[in-house]
Image: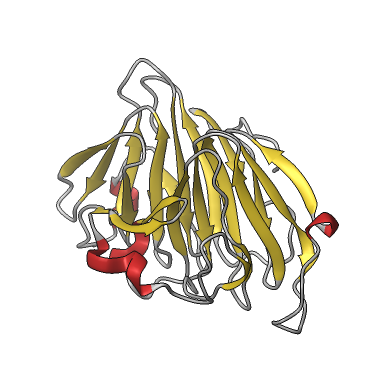
Amino acid sequence: MPSANPQTGYSYTRDLVGRTDARPYLFVEHALDPRHASPFRIHPGDHRSFVVTRGQVEVESSDEGGTLRSWRYGPFEGWHVPPGCVYRITNTGEEPAVFVEAGSTDGETREASTADPLRGGTTISGPLEASRYTVDKPWGHEVWYTQNVPGVPYAVKQIHMTAGHQSSLQSHQYKRETNYVVEGEATVLDGLLAPEDLDAVVELDRLTTTVHRPGSGWSSAPRVLHRVVAVSDYTSIEVSTPELDDVIRWQDDTGRGNGRIDAEHVGGRV
Protein backbone atom coordinates (compact mmCIF):
# COMPACT_ATOMS: atom_id res chain seq x y z
CA MET A 1 0.00 0.00 0.00
CA PRO A 2 1.18 3.59 -0.60
CA SER A 3 3.00 5.46 2.12
CA ALA A 4 1.27 7.96 4.38
CA ASN A 5 0.77 11.59 3.42
CA PRO A 6 1.41 13.74 6.53
CA GLN A 7 0.14 17.00 5.03
CA THR A 8 -3.22 17.25 6.78
CA GLY A 9 -2.60 19.46 9.78
CA TYR A 10 -4.06 16.91 12.18
CA SER A 11 -1.91 13.82 11.46
CA TYR A 12 -1.99 11.84 8.21
CA THR A 13 -4.12 10.20 5.55
CA ARG A 14 -3.22 7.16 3.46
CA ASP A 15 -4.72 5.83 0.25
CA LEU A 16 -5.47 2.12 0.70
CA VAL A 17 -6.57 1.27 -2.84
CA GLY A 18 -3.04 1.33 -4.23
CA ARG A 19 -1.85 1.51 -7.81
CA THR A 20 -4.60 0.49 -10.17
CA ASP A 21 -6.30 1.96 -13.20
CA ALA A 22 -9.67 0.93 -11.79
CA ARG A 23 -10.74 3.00 -8.78
CA PRO A 24 -14.45 2.29 -8.37
CA TYR A 25 -14.43 3.30 -4.70
CA LEU A 26 -12.56 5.47 -2.22
CA PHE A 27 -10.73 3.74 0.66
CA VAL A 28 -8.57 5.94 2.88
CA GLU A 29 -7.01 5.58 6.33
CA HIS A 30 -7.06 8.69 8.55
CA ALA A 31 -5.22 9.31 11.81
CA LEU A 32 -6.16 12.01 14.30
CA ASP A 33 -3.72 13.21 16.91
CA PRO A 34 -5.10 13.70 20.45
CA ARG A 35 -7.30 16.80 20.78
CA HIS A 36 -7.20 17.42 17.03
CA ALA A 37 -10.04 17.63 14.51
CA SER A 38 -10.48 17.35 10.77
CA PRO A 39 -11.84 20.38 8.90
CA PHE A 40 -15.60 20.57 8.37
CA ARG A 41 -16.35 18.66 5.17
CA ILE A 42 -19.18 18.12 2.71
CA HIS A 43 -19.51 15.73 -0.25
CA PRO A 44 -22.38 17.13 -2.35
CA GLY A 45 -22.42 14.20 -4.76
CA ASP A 46 -21.05 11.29 -2.75
CA HIS A 47 -22.03 8.93 0.01
CA ARG A 48 -19.27 8.08 2.50
CA SER A 49 -18.91 5.46 5.25
CA PHE A 50 -16.48 5.41 8.19
CA VAL A 51 -15.26 2.77 10.66
CA VAL A 52 -13.04 3.44 13.69
CA THR A 53 -10.11 1.04 13.97
CA ARG A 54 -8.32 2.57 16.97
CA GLY A 55 -9.32 4.94 19.77
CA GLN A 56 -12.54 6.97 19.87
CA VAL A 57 -13.83 9.89 17.85
CA GLU A 58 -16.62 12.41 18.03
CA VAL A 59 -18.55 13.27 14.87
CA GLU A 60 -20.16 16.71 14.74
CA SER A 61 -22.75 17.64 12.15
CA SER A 62 -24.28 21.05 11.39
CA ASP A 63 -27.91 21.56 10.31
CA GLU A 64 -29.26 24.41 8.19
CA GLY A 65 -29.72 26.58 11.26
CA GLY A 66 -26.11 26.18 12.37
CA THR A 67 -26.86 23.87 15.30
CA LEU A 68 -24.12 21.33 15.97
CA ARG A 69 -24.96 17.84 17.19
CA SER A 70 -22.43 15.15 18.07
CA TRP A 71 -22.10 11.35 18.13
CA ARG A 72 -19.29 9.18 19.55
CA TYR A 73 -17.81 6.03 18.05
CA GLY A 74 -15.20 3.51 19.25
CA PRO A 75 -13.30 0.59 17.68
CA PHE A 76 -15.21 -1.26 14.93
CA GLU A 77 -18.15 1.14 15.21
CA GLY A 78 -19.11 3.08 12.12
CA TRP A 79 -21.37 5.67 10.52
CA HIS A 80 -22.52 6.86 7.10
CA VAL A 81 -22.45 10.44 5.79
CA PRO A 82 -25.03 11.05 3.04
CA PRO A 83 -24.47 13.57 0.25
CA GLY A 84 -24.94 17.13 1.47
CA CYS A 85 -24.15 16.43 5.15
CA VAL A 86 -21.75 18.90 6.80
CA TYR A 87 -19.55 17.22 9.40
CA ARG A 88 -16.18 17.06 11.10
CA ILE A 89 -14.39 14.36 13.11
CA THR A 90 -12.58 15.06 16.38
CA ASN A 91 -10.30 13.00 18.59
CA THR A 92 -11.35 14.12 22.08
CA GLY A 93 -9.06 11.62 23.83
CA GLU A 94 -5.42 11.52 24.89
CA GLU A 95 -4.34 8.75 22.49
CA PRO A 96 -4.16 8.77 18.68
CA ALA A 97 -7.31 7.69 16.85
CA VAL A 98 -7.45 5.92 13.49
CA PHE A 99 -10.44 5.46 11.22
CA VAL A 100 -11.05 4.43 7.62
CA GLU A 101 -13.24 6.18 5.07
CA ALA A 102 -14.93 4.48 2.12
CA GLY A 103 -17.27 5.78 -0.50
CA SER A 104 -18.18 6.79 -4.00
CA THR A 105 -15.94 9.10 -5.99
CA ASP A 106 -18.31 10.95 -8.30
CA GLY A 107 -17.91 14.50 -7.03
CA GLU A 108 -15.81 16.95 -5.10
CA THR A 109 -15.06 17.24 -1.38
CA ARG A 110 -15.23 20.73 0.08
CA GLU A 111 -13.58 21.68 3.37
CA ALA A 112 -13.60 24.72 5.66
CA SER A 113 -12.49 25.62 9.18
CA THR A 114 -16.11 26.32 10.17
CA ALA A 115 -19.40 24.84 9.02
CA ASP A 116 -20.94 28.14 7.89
CA PRO A 117 -19.41 28.34 4.36
CA LEU A 118 -20.46 24.76 3.60
CA ARG A 119 -24.06 24.59 4.75
CA GLY A 120 -25.59 26.30 1.72
CA GLY A 121 -29.15 25.57 2.79
CA THR A 122 -28.61 21.89 3.47
CA THR A 123 -31.32 20.16 5.51
CA ILE A 124 -29.24 17.07 6.24
CA SER A 125 -28.22 17.16 9.88
CA GLY A 126 -26.31 14.13 10.94
CA PRO A 127 -24.74 10.76 10.17
CA LEU A 128 -26.51 7.42 10.06
CA GLU A 129 -25.14 4.69 12.29
CA ALA A 130 -23.61 1.83 10.31
CA SER A 131 -25.37 -1.52 10.18
CA ARG A 132 -24.26 -4.33 12.49
CA TYR A 133 -25.77 -7.01 10.24
CA THR A 134 -23.67 -10.09 10.98
CA VAL A 135 -23.12 -13.04 8.65
CA ASP A 136 -21.89 -16.28 10.23
CA LYS A 137 -19.08 -18.11 8.43
CA PRO A 138 -17.44 -21.52 9.05
CA TRP A 139 -14.22 -19.64 9.75
CA GLY A 140 -15.63 -16.71 11.79
CA HIS A 141 -18.02 -13.92 10.82
CA GLU A 142 -18.53 -10.78 8.76
CA VAL A 143 -20.24 -7.51 9.69
CA TRP A 144 -21.89 -5.83 6.71
CA TYR A 145 -21.71 -2.14 7.65
CA THR A 146 -23.45 -0.90 4.49
CA GLN A 147 -26.42 -3.27 4.73
CA ASN A 148 -28.64 -0.34 5.81
CA VAL A 149 -27.75 1.94 2.86
CA PRO A 150 -29.00 0.01 -0.20
CA GLY A 151 -28.10 1.38 -3.59
CA VAL A 152 -24.70 2.84 -2.78
CA PRO A 153 -22.03 1.78 -5.32
CA TYR A 154 -19.71 0.20 -2.76
CA ALA A 155 -19.81 -2.15 0.23
CA VAL A 156 -17.95 -2.10 3.57
CA LYS A 157 -17.40 -5.21 5.71
CA GLN A 158 -15.57 -6.20 8.84
CA ILE A 159 -14.07 -9.67 8.33
CA HIS A 160 -13.08 -11.69 11.39
CA MET A 161 -11.37 -15.07 11.01
CA THR A 162 -10.27 -17.33 13.87
CA ALA A 163 -6.74 -18.73 14.02
CA GLY A 164 -6.11 -21.85 11.97
CA HIS A 165 -9.04 -21.28 9.62
CA GLN A 166 -9.06 -20.18 6.00
CA SER A 167 -11.49 -18.76 3.49
CA SER A 168 -12.47 -20.67 0.39
CA LEU A 169 -10.20 -20.41 -2.60
CA GLN A 170 -12.40 -18.07 -4.58
CA SER A 171 -12.76 -15.61 -7.43
CA HIS A 172 -15.36 -13.05 -8.47
CA GLN A 173 -16.73 -12.39 -11.90
CA TYR A 174 -17.36 -8.66 -11.31
CA LYS A 175 -16.49 -7.78 -7.73
CA ARG A 176 -13.31 -5.83 -6.98
CA GLU A 177 -12.17 -5.58 -3.35
CA THR A 178 -9.52 -4.09 -1.08
CA ASN A 179 -8.66 -5.42 2.39
CA TYR A 180 -6.95 -3.53 5.23
CA VAL A 181 -5.68 -5.52 8.22
CA VAL A 182 -6.63 -4.11 11.64
CA GLU A 183 -5.71 -6.94 14.01
CA GLY A 184 -3.78 -10.20 13.73
CA GLU A 185 -1.84 -11.78 10.91
CA ALA A 186 -2.97 -13.47 7.71
CA THR A 187 -1.34 -15.26 4.81
CA VAL A 188 -2.88 -14.34 1.46
CA LEU A 189 -2.70 -16.51 -1.65
CA ASP A 190 -3.48 -14.73 -4.92
CA GLY A 191 -2.12 -13.55 -8.24
CA LEU A 192 -3.47 -16.12 -10.70
CA LEU A 193 -6.45 -15.73 -13.04
CA ALA A 194 -9.23 -18.23 -12.47
CA PRO A 195 -9.68 -20.87 -15.18
CA GLU A 196 -12.51 -20.49 -17.68
CA ASP A 197 -13.53 -24.08 -16.93
CA LEU A 198 -15.39 -24.16 -13.59
CA ASP A 199 -14.46 -27.83 -13.20
CA ALA A 200 -10.72 -27.20 -13.58
CA VAL A 201 -8.33 -28.15 -10.77
CA VAL A 202 -6.35 -25.21 -9.38
CA GLU A 203 -2.73 -25.85 -8.43
CA LEU A 204 -2.17 -23.90 -5.22
CA ASP A 205 1.61 -23.82 -5.60
CA ARG A 206 1.18 -21.51 -8.59
CA LEU A 207 -0.32 -18.78 -6.38
CA THR A 208 1.72 -15.97 -4.82
CA THR A 209 1.90 -16.04 -1.01
CA THR A 210 2.23 -12.88 1.11
CA VAL A 211 1.91 -12.22 4.85
CA HIS A 212 -0.11 -9.22 6.05
CA ARG A 213 -0.10 -7.63 9.49
CA PRO A 214 -1.92 -4.60 10.95
CA GLY A 215 -1.67 -1.58 8.68
CA SER A 216 -1.03 -3.56 5.50
CA GLY A 217 -3.42 -4.92 2.90
CA TRP A 218 -4.11 -5.95 -0.68
CA SER A 219 -6.59 -5.62 -3.54
CA SER A 220 -8.18 -8.38 -5.61
CA ALA A 221 -9.41 -7.72 -9.14
CA PRO A 222 -12.26 -9.61 -10.82
CA ARG A 223 -11.38 -13.18 -11.92
CA VAL A 224 -8.24 -13.30 -9.73
CA LEU A 225 -8.02 -16.35 -7.44
CA HIS A 226 -7.46 -15.58 -3.75
CA ARG A 227 -7.60 -17.15 -0.31
CA VAL A 228 -6.96 -15.80 3.22
CA VAL A 229 -5.41 -18.04 5.91
CA ALA A 230 -5.61 -16.84 9.52
CA VAL A 231 -2.17 -17.21 11.12
CA SER A 232 -3.72 -15.77 14.30
CA ASP A 233 -7.17 -14.42 15.06
CA TYR A 234 -7.47 -11.87 12.30
CA THR A 235 -9.71 -8.86 11.56
CA SER A 236 -9.78 -6.67 8.48
CA ILE A 237 -11.97 -4.01 6.92
CA GLU A 238 -12.91 -4.73 3.32
CA VAL A 239 -14.22 -2.20 0.81
CA SER A 240 -15.52 -3.52 -2.48
CA THR A 241 -17.88 -2.98 -5.35
CA PRO A 242 -21.41 -3.98 -4.29
CA GLU A 243 -21.69 -7.49 -5.79
CA LEU A 244 -21.50 -9.31 -2.45
CA ASP A 245 -23.04 -12.56 -3.72
CA ASP A 246 -20.61 -12.81 -6.65
CA VAL A 247 -18.45 -15.69 -5.33
CA ILE A 248 -17.07 -18.71 -7.18
CA ARG A 249 -15.62 -21.19 -4.67
CA TRP A 250 -12.93 -23.36 -6.25
CA GLN A 251 -12.00 -25.07 -2.97
CA ASP A 252 -13.80 -24.87 0.37
CA ASP A 253 -13.09 -26.70 3.63
CA THR A 254 -16.81 -27.21 4.33
CA GLY A 255 -17.97 -27.95 0.80
CA ARG A 256 -19.91 -24.75 0.24
CA GLY A 257 -21.08 -24.03 -3.29
CA ASN A 258 -20.95 -20.80 -5.27
CA GLY A 259 -22.79 -17.60 -4.49
CA ARG A 260 -24.80 -16.62 -1.42
CA ILE A 261 -25.18 -19.23 1.34
CA ASP A 262 -28.61 -18.48 2.80
CA ALA A 263 -27.95 -20.43 6.03
CA GLU A 264 -25.19 -17.96 6.89
CA HIS A 265 -27.74 -15.12 6.86
CA VAL A 266 -30.42 -16.65 9.06
CA GLY A 267 -31.82 -13.80 11.11
CA GLY A 268 -29.04 -11.47 9.99
CA ARG A 269 -28.21 -11.19 13.67
CA VAL A 270 -27.25 -7.78 14.98
Q: Could you say where residue 243 lies in the image, as x and y percent from the top left?
A: 50, 74
Q: Quick one: 239 or 90, which is closer to the camera?
A: 239
Left or right of 126 in this view: 30: right
Residue 119 visible in the shown view: yes
Vertical arrangement, residue 244 with respect to residue 128, above or below:
below
Q: Could you say where residue 80 lies in the image, as x and y percent from the top left?
A: 32, 55
Q: Which image quadrant for residue 36?
A: top left
Total count of labels:
0
Q: Could you say where residue 129 lies in the image, as x and y percent from the top left?
A: 25, 52
Residue drawn 54% across and 46% down?
165
Q: Residue furthest front?
A: 254
Q: Quick one: 228 or 241, which is closer to the camera?
A: 228
Q: Which residue lies furthest to the bottom in this view?
A: 197
Q: Could you say where residue 152 lies in the image, as x and y percent from the top left?
A: 40, 71
Vertical arrangement, residue 225 with respect to residue 16, above or below:
below
Q: In which quarter of the image is the C terminus?
A: bottom left
Q: Which image quadrant for residue 190?
A: bottom right
Q: Quick one: 77 or 37, which is closer to the camera?
A: 77
Residue drawn 50% across and 66% down?
107
Q: What's the image's color scheme? A: secondary structure
Residue drawn 52% across and 75% down?
257
Left or right of 25 in this view: 73: left
Q: Which image quadrant for residue 146?
A: bottom left
Residue 83 visible in the shown view: no
Vertical arrangement, residue 187 with respect to residue 26, above or below:
above
Q: Which residue lies furthest to the right in this view?
A: 206
Q: Quadrant of the N terminus?
A: top right
Residue drawn 77% across and 73% down?
201
